[in-house]
Image (cartoon, rainbow, N blue to C red):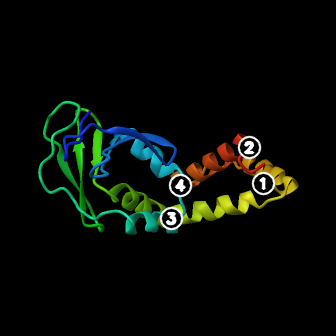
Amino acid sequence: MKCPVCDLRLSRVTYARTNVQQCTDCLGLLLPNHRVKTIERRVDKELEQLREEIRGTPNHDTLAVLRCPQCQARMTKIEVKDFGFQLDECDPCQLTWFDPRELALLQLAFESRPQRLELNAMRERLKNMTATERAEYERRLSKLKDRGSPFQQAVRGATLDLLRSGIFF
């Protein structure tokens, strides 16, 4: 596929352990929409790393209407509130174009939410638990009868997944 801005061939690169397409000239990124969600869930970059990526990348938002690299249809501009930029999305192909630094800005917004900060703090506490504390925590967590709010269910699920994956061992 070709870059919708420069018309150069896109290269496959890795961003947050996820394969994406990038233009080597303008540094824009093309992602399937489901990969955007994958990147949001990853905790590969600390907030300061994201801020540094944003500071070190050119700041320009493509204002022209872009054509989807896959189907050539006009991409829809999606306003990202509170950040002053627009993403370009092709709904039929489920692809989103990110101008330079926009993906880092979106990830920073996600990582800065109070729920995400709380979840990251909990992950840090879990990482520092002894094996005995971890076993007791998992035992108590599994005995919870009330499933709680959707956020609590998500935290519980993420915690169990992390414990089972062996990340903290």
- Alpha carbon distance from label 4 to label 2: 23 Å
What amino acid is labelled 1 in the image?
Tyr
Q: First in sequence: mark 1 or mark 4?
A: 1
Circle 3 packing at 10 Å, graded few (<14), some (14-19), many (20+), is few
Circle 1 packing at 10 Å, graded few (<14), some (14-19), many (20+), is few
> Considering the numbered disc 1 on the image, is that residue within a helix, a strand or a loop?
helix
Q: Residue at x 54, y 63 (%)?
A: 46
Of discs 3 and 1, which sits in the foreground? 3
Q: Quadrant of residue 120?
A: bottom right
What amino acid is labelled 2 in the image?
Gly
Q: Residue furthest top?
A: 71
Of discs 4 and 2, which sits in the foreground? 2
Q: Residue at x 19, y 47 (%)?
A: 5
89 sits left or right of 130 in the view: left
Q: Position of residue 48 (x, y in %)?
A: 51, 69
Q: Please give the label number shown on residue 137.
A: 1
Q: Which residue is mark 4?
A: 151
78 sits left or right of 10 in the view: left
Q: First in sequence: mark 2 or mark 3?
A: 3
> Considering the numbered disc 2 on the image, is that residue within a helix, a strand or a loop?
loop
Of discs 2 and 3, which sits in the foreground? 3
- Alpha carbon distance from label 1 to label 4: 18 Å
26 sits left or right of 62 in the view: right
Q: Which residue is mark 3?
A: 49
Q: Quadrant of residue 52?
A: bottom left
Q: First in sequence: mark 4 or mark 3?
A: 3
Q: Which residue is mark 2?
A: 166
What amino acid is labelled 4 in the image?
Phe
Of discs 4 and 3, which sits in the foreground? 3
Q: Position of residue 64 (x, y in %)?
A: 12, 53
